[in-house]
Each structure stands twice: as structure tokens, then as C-alpha cells.
Amino acid sequence: MLTDRFGRSIEYLRLSVTDRCDLRCNYCIPKGFKDFEEPANWLTFDEIERVVAAFARLGTRRLRLTGGEPLLRRNLPELAARLSALPGLDDLSITSNGTQLRKHAAALYAAGVKRLNISLDSLRRDCVHDITGSDSLPRILDGLMAAKQAGFSPIKINMVAMKGVNEADIGQMAAFCIEHGFVLRLIEAMPMGDTGRAANYLDLQPVLEQLRRQFDLAEQTTALGGGPARYWATRDGRFSLGLITPISQHFCATCNRVRLSVDGTLYMCLGQEQRFELRPLLRAGISDAGLEAAIAEAIELKPERHEFSEKPQKLVRFMSMTGG
């Protein structure tokens, strides 16, 4: 098992397959940004498979495909099938904005992806337009229904809660999730780059107390997945709520993940700049043993914690550059 210098087991890899996206969420990609990574610098499917296989041999059991919008990567179901067949990999999931799900849901499920996280910040069409820069809500909802029909379970709705933007929509989103059997996950906006710092941060602790009273929620001891969310559920199990609170109640002491960007750069923490480039090693013909040693060396760079609260101006890269 990969273990960092603070004794944390690294069992979860988040892998970005593209930094491109068909939406422009105002807390993620700067308006007018066009400086995306050149496709020649993207890891190929063969390179991705080598890296994931090496992580799996080192004890990493969970893999999430992210972006940008991962479903924009051509032939993604083919890659998913290759990765899901790797020995030692127990869990393969995807985070998506949902706009392309209608086309790909069945193929992804057949390829071995069983869990989905869908980014959706409101059920109000105008609010979604304001956040994403396009009239995308109908396509997202259509994709969600296609995913439900295909058999994905659980389907989690990732809602970045922002003060004065969509905080009043949380109750409606909870009702929507109860109706369809989805899990609602509320996420605090993180100060990543100018876009993240401009987001209207909302402390989720008061929101949690309100929802606990409204739905009679009890805290769950078993997590739904391998990520940082803490979960609560109704007594009858019809509704589950997850909270990701990197600011108001950070989870650095139990952080079990690293991120691999589309260009093969390993990032050890969303809130720090430590990184390790794997692409040059892969293209120089590194052996499998050498690749495993390089990954172990990279994990030693993982910091103890982020500094979002103490140094909010520190991080200049934004989310889509790192991988969601």
C-alpha cells in the first residue's frame, strides 16, 4: 500500500482524461480561457493504462475519471473497459457534467463504470445558465434520466453551494434527489485561481443543521465511496446527504487521494503546488518497476494540509487544469 510521510494510505486516484469542457462554470474555468493543453501532450490510453496499473499494483483500489468534461474524450468507454479489467482495481467511477450522458450512459455501464457523480448546481434554468454560461439544464436532466435507466447506482448530485447564488435551491434539490433516488452532495467553493476566489463561499455547517432538522438526518458511519464526504441519511434510507467541506471543516488528516492531470502531472493536493511529472518518464521508456518507484517518490511530496484559509491567494491554477 502506498503510504505518505504522514501515515496516510493513498488508495484513491482521480485521473483527468481531458481539460476541455463544453460548459464554462464561473467557479471553474475563467471566462474566455482558451489555453488548453495540446492533445499531443495528453496521456494516451496506453500510457493511462500503464499508470493506473502501476497504482493498482501499489495498492490503489479506487479510480475516478474526471476532466474538464471526461465524456468529451473520444472513445472513453473503450478506456473505461480497459481500466475496469485491471487486477486490483475495485472501483471505477466518473464525474461528469451530464451533458453527454444520454449518448454514453449505456456504453459506460457496460464498460464497468458503476457509479456517477453529476455536477448540477440548481434546478432553475436561469441559474444554471448563469453558472455554466449556457442553457444546459435540459441536457443535464436528460442525461441523468438516461444514467438512471442504464442502471448506475448510486448517482450522486454534486452541488457547489454559493451564497446568494443557489443556496435557496438546496431544499428543491433535496426533494429532487429523494424523488429519483439520487444522493445529494453539497460542496463548499474552493479558492482555486481567480475563478474559485470569486465564487460566493457558503459555510455549510449552518446548512447542515437546517437539513438535519428538516429531514431528521442521522450521521452515517459507512461512507458512500472513497472520497472526503461525510454522510447523513433519513431513518428510512430514502435520502442521503453528503458534505464536502474543505474550508469550514477540512479533511486533510484523512486525505487518501492524488490527482493525475491529462498531461501526466501528479498533483498531491488541490491546495498546494507539489507536483511530479510522469509523462516525460513514460515517453522515455521507463520500466514498470521504475514507474512504481517514481509514483512512490511522488507520494513523498504530498503535504500535510492545504492552506485555503490561511493563504487564499496562493494557488494560481484553477480546477480544470488540475482535474476535478
Image (cartoon, rainbow, N blue to C red):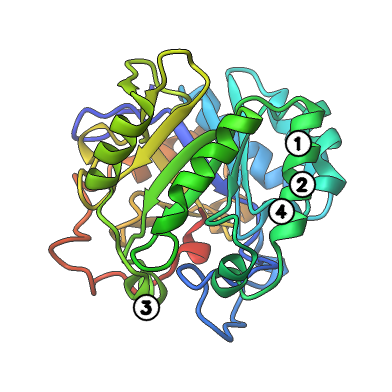
Disc on the earlier residue, 3 or 4: 4
Residue at mark 2 to residue at mark 4: CA–CA distance: 5 Å
Q: Amino acid at mark 1?
A: Ala
Q: Which residue is mark 4?
A: 140
Q: Are marks 3 and 1 in contact (CB under 8 Å)?
A: no
Q: Are marks 2 and 4 in contact (CB under 8 Å)?
A: yes
Check disc 4 and report its element: helix, strand or loop.
helix
Res 147 label:
1
Mark 3 vs mark 1, foreground winner is 1
Residue at mark 3 to residue at mark 1: CA–CA distance: 33 Å
Question: What residue do we see at 33% from left, 24% from top?
Answer: 216
| Total residue callouts | 4
Mark 2 vs mark 3, foreground winner is 2
Within 10 Å of disc 4 (Cα), the crowding (few <14, some 14-19, many 20+) is many
Q: Which residue is mark 2?
A: 143
Asked whether, in this view, residue 241 is left or right of residue 125, the answer is left
Within 10 Å of disc 2 (Cα), the crowding (few <14, some 14-19, many 20+) is many
- Does 57 appear above or below 20? above
Check disc 3 and report its element: helix, strand or loop.
helix
Within 10 Å of disc 1 (Cα), the crowding (few <14, some 14-19, many 20+) is many
Asked whether, in this view, residue 58 is left or right of residue 284, the answer is left
Q: Which residue is mark 3?
A: 194
